[in-house]
Image: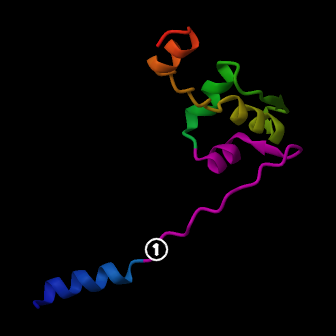
Amino acid sequence: MNRSSSTKTLQAAVQPQPEPVQPHIIHPTAVYFVDQAQKILRLKESTIRREVRAGRLQIAKRAGRYYLLGAWIISWLQAGAIQRRRPLASSTNINEHNGEI
């Protein structure tokens, strides 16, 4: 084994592993700054602006600062829930319901 390959192996073994992301519990009565919500939800800077402009996310402005209530964030997340599609009925089931074979 030459020196460069053993050095690469050693470097790979020494690199620290990233810490696992801990989930954040959003309390309905908590007050968040926009940058806090972006960090917690791992959003791009423009996402909250876009969601507020589209009327999907509620925001408050007081004393020149923007605030989000935890309840508003929870409502926004719940409103974006994806509904499962119901499977289409097979043609045999449809014919059985019509009395046909």
Give the quadrant of residue 37.
top right
Does residue 66 appear in the picture of this structure? no
Residue closer to the observer: 79 or 33? 79
Please report the bounds of the magenta region as a residue range.
16-42
Q: Nearer the viewer, residue 96 or 37?
A: 96
Q: Residue furthest right?
A: 29
User: Can you say whether 89 is above or below 12 in the image?
Assistant: above
**Along the viewing direction, whichever of 40 and 99 lies nearer the viewer:** 99
Q: Position of residue 48 (x, y in %)?
A: 64, 32
Q: Which of these two is toward me, 8 or 100?
A: 100
Q: Secondary structure at mark 1?
A: loop
Percent from the top left, x then y, of residue 100? 50, 9
- Residue 20 in the figure: left or right of residue 24: left
Image vertical order of residue 8 relative to residue 40, above or below: below
Label 1 is placed on what type of residue? Answer: Gln
Indicate whether residue 28 is drawn in magenta.
Answer: yes
* Residue 54 spot, x, y in % from top left: 65, 18
Tell me where residue 20 appears, x and y as whole percent. 56, 66
Name the residue tied to disc 1: 17
